Amino acid sequence: MTLQDAQNSDGTEGWSTELAYSRLTDDEIHEKLIFEWLRFFRKNEKFKSYCNAKRSGNIEICERMESNNSKISALYEDWADIHVLPSVDQDSPAWKDWINEKGYLFGFNRVKLVDSPERGVVA
């Protein structure tokens, strides 16, 4: 399957046919890979159902899903409800907040430099 076929067949909109990774830094490539991982993780129906149950406080469904999948609660503990992100767009503030909070799970460390009490700068 070509990249073009994948674009047309399975809803992976947002892929660029011009993958110019050679012009990106290692951190930029790493962030793009994490972004794609999150997009596909959000398509996992079982985790989506678990997140919905957690969000609505449905303990019975959570317990049933946990008994069928011993790792689902640990995934939720690490990633939280990935379905409440308002947008999964690499330029969105929600993505930047998420990667700054959860990037450490991928070994992606960010340092927050504060140059004034009102403003933080991510390096």
Image: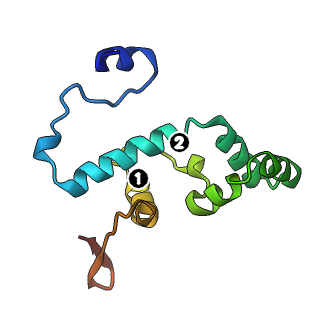
Residue at 73% in and 53% down: 70
* The label number, if any, that marks residue 26 in the structure image: none
First in sequence: mark 2 or mark 1? 2
Residue at 81% in and 56% down: 57
* The label number, if any, that marks residue 95 in the structure image: 1
Quadrant in which residue 44 is drawn? top right
Foreground residue among 49 and 71: 71
How busy is the neighbourhood of tag 2: few (under 14 within 10 Å), some, or many (20 plus)? some
Relative vertical location of residue 17 with respect to residue 45 in this rendering, above or below: above
Label 1 SS? helix
Please state which amino acid type lies under the numbered disc 2. Answer: Phe
Relative vertical location of residue 112 with respect to residue 63 in this rendering, above or below: below
Report the quarter where the C terminus lies: bottom left
Please state which amino acid type lies under the numbered disc 1. Answer: Trp
* The label number, if any, that marks residue 41 in the structure image: 2
Relative vertical location of residue 92 with respect to residue 10 in this rendering, above or below: below
> Can residue 88 be seen from the camera position used here?
no
Residue at 38% in and 46% down: 35
Q: Position of residue 76 (x, y in %)?
A: 64, 57
